[in-house]
Image: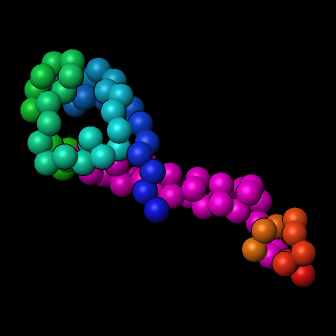
């Protein structure tokens, strides 16, 4: 599952916070909107991976209805969970 999510990362050149979608930071080549220095996905790969993992975990939690682990497919809210 992929959700288009806006994230905020700092430009390594000017330290300006860049607010863009996750996929924007995964482009092969792009420029910082603040200082217009060339940036590449490789410069953000580590942090972007981390954020993606976090988002995946959040999505899992949303699907499960809450962060708590409950038994059954729906947390026992409907009769399919016995
Ligand atoms: Zn910059």
**Magenta segment, principal secondary structure?**
helix
- Above or below 17: residue 6: below
Q: Is residue 58 above or below residue 15?
A: below
Residue 82 within the magenta-colored segment of the rendering: no
Tally of numbered tags: 0
First to last magenta residue range: 44-72
Res. 60 image quadrant: bottom right
Q: Residue 32 location, x and y as percent?
A: 18, 27
Residue 70 at least partly seen? no
Q: What residue is rendered at 26% in x and 41% in y?
A: 24
In this rendering, would 7 be left or right of 76?
A: left
Image quadrant where residue 74 sits: bottom right
Residue 2, position as x, y percentages in the image: 43, 57
Which quadrant of the figure contains the C terminus?
bottom right
In the rendered view, does 56 fall on the left or right side of 8?
right
Q: Position of residue 69 (x, y in %)?
A: 76, 66
């Amino acid at each position: 599952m992929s959700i288009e999510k806006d994230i905020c990362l700092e430009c390594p050149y000017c330290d300006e916070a860049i607010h863009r979608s996750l996929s924007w930071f995964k482009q092969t080549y792009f420029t910082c909107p603040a200082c217009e220095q060339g940036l590449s996905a490789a410069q953000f790969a580590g942090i972007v991976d981390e954020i993606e993992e976090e988002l995946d975990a959040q999505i899992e939690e949303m699907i499960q209805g809450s962060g708590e682990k409950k038994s059954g497919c729906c947390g026992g809210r409907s009769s399919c969970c016995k």
